[in-house]
Amino acid sequence: MIKFSYLLNQDNFELQASNWCGLEKVLLNGKVVSQKFNFGILSSHDILLKNGKKYNLELLVDPQTDLLTCRIYNQQNLVTVLKQGKNQLQKSQRLIEAGLVCMLFSLLTFYMVF
């Protein structure tokens, strides 16, 4: 799971993206306000705040640098750019793979014993 968090005025934006199932969620102050499945290199989430301000969060993968980038726009004006390297993605993938291997090994051992 990849997470980008940004505090803007009184609002906490968080973009979560699963590197396994493609599910993306945008949380605003801890509540899910947008979610979708995405398997491409670019996705966009439009958010409307209670005060009427429109925000757009873009998640993209730069194919040249392998950086994961989250851009936050307020009415088409860039507010910030958040980046994470490929290492974070690889760490979470390895952790999930190790868990799956352990679970499969345990099941295999259980069936061989009984």
Image (cartoon, helix red, strand yellow):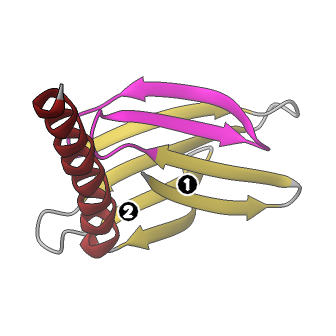
Q: Which element carries disc 2, helix, strand or loop?
A: strand
Q: Which element carries disc 1, helix, strand or loop?
A: strand
Question: Which dot marks residue 69?
Answer: 2
Q: Nearer the viewer, mark 1 or mark 2?
A: 2
The residue at 66%/30% (across/down) is 32
Magenta stretch: includes residue 36: yes
Query: How much space separates mark 1 and mark 2, taking CA atoms?
Result: 10 Å
Horizontally, residue 65 falls left or right of residue 7, namely left
Part of the protein shown in magenta: 17-41
Determine whether label 1 and label 2 are within 8 Å by CB. Answer: no
Q: Position of residue 104 (x, y in %)?
A: 19, 39
- Seen from the viewer's position, the closer of residues 90 and 95 is 95
The image quarter containing residue 65 is bottom left
- What residue does disc 1 label? 72
Horizontally, residue 26 falls left or right of residue 109, namely right
Q: Position of residue 62 (x, y in %)?
A: 21, 63
